[in-house]
Amino acid sequence: MNRYDQLARLLLLSLLASCTLRAAGPTSASDSGTSPSKDAGANDSGINAPDAAIALEGDFFVSPQGSDSNNGSQSSPFATITHASTMVQPGQVVEILEGIYSEHVRIETSGTAGLPITYVGRSGAIIDGGGFDLSDGGDYDGLFVVSGKSYIVLDGITLRNTNHHAFAINPGNESDTISDITIRNCRTENTDGSGVLVYGHFPFVKYQIRNILIEDNEIVLPQQGVFNGNRRYHEDITIGGGVEDFVISGNHVDVENQDRELWDGGPLGIDVKDGVRNGKIFNNHVENVPSQGIYVDAYLDGASNIEVFQNLVHGISGYGIVVGAEAGGRLDDVKVYNNVVYDSRWGGVRVADYIIDGFTPTEKTNVHIFNNTLYGVDISSTTLASGKVYNNLVDTAESLDIAGSYEVRNNCEAAPQFVDPANNDFHLQSTSPCIDVGTSEGAPSVDFDGNARPQGGGYDTGAFEYSP
């Protein structure tokens, strides 16, 4: 186990003594000189996730050459994942063997606390939705559906070519509550809708979905369909409709949009919205998105206690990171820190005043933006907002444009003297004026790379702490 994994295991304690959370950095398809750290920082995720390092052996097996009349052993596998889900019991593992599956998967059995049901995709196992139509399946359908089920782990599964969402997680009936769903090490590609959609019935039922972990996934070419003349509704990774206690970590989102002038209203990269609370979004790499990169939106029914940190965001047609309340919902206690944003056409970090016709804007309170590095982009805020803006590094090409009731201090807007900005290396040279000029009050304990702060006589501004 390497140093980063040891730190992550110590810092990310699970609520279950038998479970741990592995917080690893994303796989990057970019040639960027900067990548998110594998150290999540001093933040307890509170998500119950089985140990991702355990080598799993299947209790049941699925193969395209199998039959659902078989016994599900490795030598006599089932043909469909859905059938395997009717046979598996809490604590057991279903291994999806190599091959192409043309299947609309629906998970039929829940695990239990401490005994999740795990579905593992072996290398070369691909679920392909190109052979059937899901467009009439409802807003929250998808190629691989977990509806009304809890304690499920989806690991290493590849989904592609669907005219709906890829992974769709929902509570099913309005009377149901689900919890402890993990999607990790998976890949989605060429989907009309979201790569991952987790959505409840909020505001009709409060917080039906709890303990969600979305980590180390590749989301490529999502939101390729058209809906009402625009890109498909929802976003590349979406959590909303009443979700609490969630982590989105280590994911790579790439829409492969190469035209920064293109703005089509979507898809957004990562969006948490409409009745979400107690969430962390960190160590993600979001690139080439023809809209906003990361969005925290109270929408109609609120967002609170959300942290957005140690993310790399670039190649964005809108803003890199946005905080807002489009339908007048209350937004409170949002922290945006240790992020790196560049090549974002509208700006770096924005506290927005977007409002849908017919709704009244509400104040966004306790929005704290600190220790971010922004190259060629700014930090801006609407007047209906309050909080603190400090220890940020905004290079001289842009500036701070802060309205509202903010405490603004200890930001560095001088020429930062990055190591190699042409190759996206935004560490500081030893002569940078941004070293040791930050405040210690409220500063994060580690930087973007997971290095301890401070390293010198004081705290540095920006996402990187200079280390000789």
Image (cartoon, grey):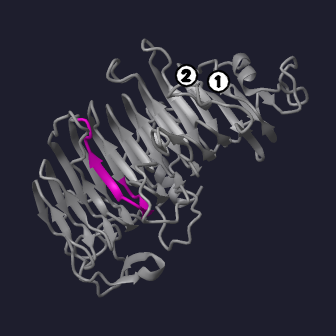
* Position of residue 85 measured from the top left corner of the image (x, y, whole percent): 69, 21
The residue closer to the viewer here, 165 or 358, is: 358
Residue 104 lies in what quarter of the image?
Answer: top right
* Position of residue 150 measured from the top left corner of the image (x, y, whole percent): 53, 23
| Labels 2 and 1 touching (C-beta < 8 A) | yes
Residue 188 lies in what quarter of the image?
Answer: top right
Magenta segment, which residues?
A: 309-327
Q: Main secondary structure of the magenta part?
A: strand
Query: Residue at coordinates 41% horizontally, 41% vertically from top-left?
Result: 45
The residue identified by callout 2 is 147
Query: Residue at coordinates 51% horizontally, 58% vertically from top-left?
Result: 4
Residue 310 part of the magenta segment:
yes
Report the residue that reaches farthest toward the left: 405
Please, is residue 153 above or below residue 345 in the view?
above
Can residue 21 be seen here? The reply is no
Left or right: 452 with respect to 103?
left
Please, is residue 27 above or below residue 194 in the view?
below
Q: CA distance from mark 2 to mark 1?
A: 8 Å
Q: For mark 2, give the secondary structure.
A: strand
Report the residue that reaches farthest toward the bottom: 431
Report the residue that reaches farthest toward the right: 75
Left or right: 302 with respect to 451?
left
Label 2 Cα crowd, 10 Å radius (few <14 / some 14-19 / many 20+): many
Quadrant of image for the C terminus: bottom left
Query: Residue at coordinates 76% horizontally, 47% vertically from top-left?
Result: 123
Left or right: 46 with respect to 19?
left
Label 1 Cα crowd, 10 Å radius (few <14 / some 14-19 / many 20+): some
The three-letter code of the residue at mark 2 reads Ser
* Position of residue 451 measured from the top left corner of the image (x, y, whole percent): 39, 66
Q: Earlier in the sequence, mark 2 or mark 1?
A: 1
Q: Which mark is residue 106?
A: 1
